[in-house]
């Protein structure tokens, strides 16, 4: 898998994807998002891959969509192409677990990309923001929607209307980030979390992810009903039998992903 704007490394069953346009602070060009979409298609169907960690570099996870590419586009250019929505949204529909490991800037589309992952682990150097308003536009890949669900209306309005950045401590305090670690521990922490998930039953992990995501799309009673159906369906899996038998027999479960 050779890409111009991404690096891919396997750590056991975890694919570590590194955004790799360091000179442009990993600005998300159409070429980069197309490559990411193609890579995720491959990883989703590859049984050797159980989870994904998405990261950038010390200075930037990603500083947003590529402004230099976008700046001269007309309304018809972005409307007719639906501004490459499919490749941007690919991460949000990825069925295997995904963790964003964020150091430095996660701005605009970079913050939106991190929020498409299942959870975000941040280095103490991380800075999040939706600064689109400062360049005459608004978030376009879910920033006004996902950020609001993560941190609530007041803080989301503050971020989106002023374009200010939020440091890692504030991001953890308000629930944008699940864990905050010293920068030098970021990748170890994210890879350890992904590896832990990779040891568990893959179909059960996918169901758990699907069920949590449902909370963003439906009412509480429908969501609970959906969860109950998936919960019941785990009882059709050999892995549920193995998991509960292993608990009763005081041993480690050996899940077979079936
Ligand atoms: N696009 C293109 N190039 C960028 C971007 C970007 N978003 N961010 C940084 N770069 C480039 C700079 O132009 C510079 O290049 P060069 O060396 O050739 O001049 C290089 O990266 C280094 O950047 P700086 O010199 O600016 O570095 P600083 O440390 O001084 O500043 C900042 C870092 C504060 C992050 C600054 O670079 C910055 O403000 N960047 C722009 C942040 C921004 O506004 N992001 C939002 C972009 S809009 C967006 O994301 C909308 C998403 C919509 C998605 C819709 C999909 C359907």
Image (cartoon, grey):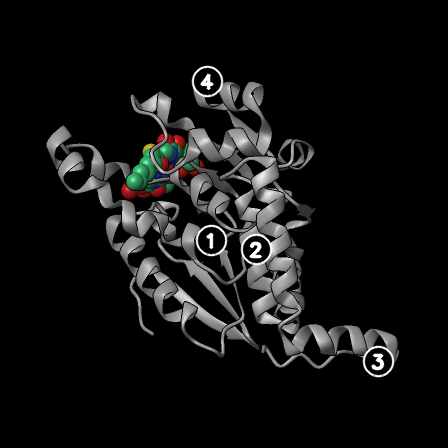
Q: Going from the N terminus, do you reach mark 2 or mark 3 first?
A: 2
Q: Is residue 255 above or below residue 163?
A: below
Distance of mark 4 from mark 1, alpha carbons?
25 Å
Q: Going from the N terminus, do you reach mark 4 or mark 1 first?
A: 1
For the residue labelled by badge 2, is the local secondary structure a helix, a strand or a loop?
helix
At horizontal 35% and vertical 53% (from top left) the residue drawn is 21
Task: Give me the disc on residue 56.
Answer: 1
Quarter where residue 167 is shown: top right
x, y (%) of residue 62? 42, 45
Q: Going from the N terminus, do you reach mark 1 or mark 2 first?
A: 1
Quadrant (top left, top right, bottom left, bottom right) of the C terminus: bottom right
Q: Which residue is mark 3?
A: 251
Q: Is residue 44 above or below residue 89?
A: below
Ligand 1 position by quadrant: top left
Q: Which residue is mark 4?
A: 162
Q: Which residue is mark 2?
A: 209
For the residue labelled by badge 4, is the local secondary structure a helix, a strand or a loop?
helix
For the residue labelled by badge 3, is the local secondary structure a helix, a strand or a loop?
loop
Task: Give me the disc on residue 135.
Answer: none
Distance of mark 3 from mark 4, alpha carbons?
54 Å
* Res. 245 in view: yes
């Amino acid at each position: 898998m050779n890409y111009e704007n991404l690096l891919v490394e396997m750590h056991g069953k975890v694919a570590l994807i590194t955004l790799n346009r360091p000179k442009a602070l990993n600005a998300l060009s159409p070429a980069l998002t197309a490559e990411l979409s193609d890579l995720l298609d491959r990883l989703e169907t590859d049984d050797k891959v159980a989870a994904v960690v998405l990261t950038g570099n010390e200075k930037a996870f990603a500083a947003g969509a590529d402004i230099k590419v976008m700046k001269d586009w007309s309304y018809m250019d972005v409307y007719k192409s639906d501004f490459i929505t499919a490749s941007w949204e690919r991460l949000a529909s990825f069925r295997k677990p995904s963790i964003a490991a964020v150091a430095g800037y996660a701005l605009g589309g970079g913050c939106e990309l991190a929020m498409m992952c299942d959870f975000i682990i941040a280095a103490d150097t991380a800075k999040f923001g939706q600064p689109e308003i400062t360049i005459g536009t608004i978030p376009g890949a879910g920033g006004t929607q996902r950020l609001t669900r993560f941190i609530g209306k007041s803080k989301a309005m503050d971020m989106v209307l002023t374009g200010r950045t939020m440091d890692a401590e504030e991001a953890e305090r308000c629930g944008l980030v699940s864990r905050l670690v010293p920068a030098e521990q970021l990748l170890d922490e994210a890879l350890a979390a992904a590896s832990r998930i990779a040891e568990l039953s893959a179909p059960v992990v996918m169901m758990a992810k699907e069920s949590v995501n449902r909370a963003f799309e439906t009412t509480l009673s429908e969501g609970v009903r959906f969860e109950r159906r998936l919960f019941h369906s785990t009882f059709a899996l050999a892995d549920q039998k193995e998991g509960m038998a292993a608990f009763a027999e005081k041993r480690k479960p050996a899940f077979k992903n079936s």
